[in-house]
Amino acid sequence: MSTLPNFDVHTHAFHPKIAAKVLRQLEHHYHIPPLGTGELSDLLPRLAQAGIDRACIHCAATSAAQVIPANRWALSLQKTPGLIPFGTLHPDYKNMAEELELLQRKGIKGIKIHPDFQGFRLDAPALLPCFEAMQDNFTLMVHVGDLLPPEQNPSCPFKLAYIKRLFPNLKIIAAHFGGYRHWQYVLQAFTGLEIYLDCSSSLFTIGQSLLEEIFRKWPRELLLFGSDYPLFDPGDEMKRLQYRLKLSDAQLRRIMQNANALELC
């Protein structure tokens, strides 16, 4: 049996002062009652119970003023064993190049962006220098998709494919099986591109035939497990992934361990 660590590449943990407020915002937007508190004291035992050894922790600065506080919170999480905090960026922040250099020096391996919450388009020209600087230095986790059609939505599979073609050395994880509510476009947009897909916030609603088609056609080594805690429980999402795709224990374990290739720790 493999001794590689199991990963949850998509979780969130907030400072106790803001956790309740963030959860209210999440529930208002997604109409999903969170199952967790959004605090480390709740996340860590859930990870342990699920047999998850490493968890990527994400935040997203919704304004330029939030970049520094969000990234300092991420840096503070490095002291917790098993956690892999990602930094964040915002195109309105004027010193983004210097901030990326600092995060790299401090050992941060990834950056998370959520264009829909952060108020910018994924293909905004102001982001391109950041993506260029991230090549070979960071893994980029991107929220993709929402209720609007691709051309109107701030993020979509086609915009992310455009970024990947511009910056082929940028390691990218497309959250939510490549596009929340945009699943029908994922294979059309991404085929031929080395983009990782995580399964977060998808299994509760994606149609079975579409789920099976993506799973059947996408390279297995590019599929990652993500729970999107605190919206969902990591252990429950592992069971749901295995049930919906009829995975053997070995197949599930492989998905849980695919993130080791990203060298995040």
Image (spheres, helix red, strand yellow):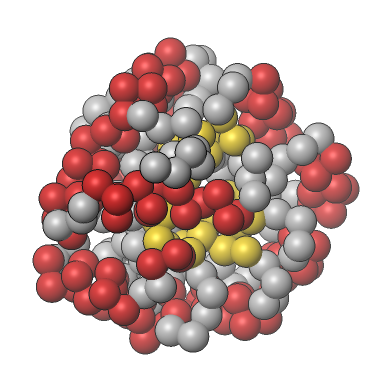
Q: Quadrant of residue 176?
A: bottom left
Residue 201 lies, with reference to residue 42, above or below; the image says below
**Which corner quadrant holds the N terminus?**
top left
Q: Residue 110 at x, y = what percent? A: 65, 48
Residue 47 lies, with reference to residue 129, above or below; the image says above
**Which corner quadrant holds the C terminus?**
top right
Left or right relative to 206: residue 28 = right
Can residue 57 be seen at all in this image of the molecule? yes
Residue 42 lies, with reference to residue 149, above or below; the image says above
Between 203 and 25, the one nearer to me in the picture:
203
At a point 12% along the width and 66% down the height, the residue shown is 208
Between 133 and 6, the one nearer to me in the picture:
6
Q: Residue 28 at x, y = what percent? A: 28, 40
At a point 40% along the width and 61% down the height, the residue shown is 223
Residue 131 lies, with reference to residue 192, above or below; the image says above
Q: Residue 119 at x, y = what percent? A: 53, 56
Left or right relative to 67: residue 214 = left
The total number of labels drawn is: 0
Q: Quadrant of residue 232?
A: top left
Can residue 92 be seen at all in this image of the molecule? no
At a point 51% along the width and 51% down the height, the residue shown is 259
Left or right relative to 77: residue 255 = left
Q: Residue 155 at x, y = what percent? A: 46, 67
Between 119 and 23, the one nearer to me in the picture:
23
At a point 67% along the width and 20% down the height, the residue shown is 79
- For this orientation, the residue located farthest to the front is 1
Between 3 and 209, the one nearer to me in the picture:
3
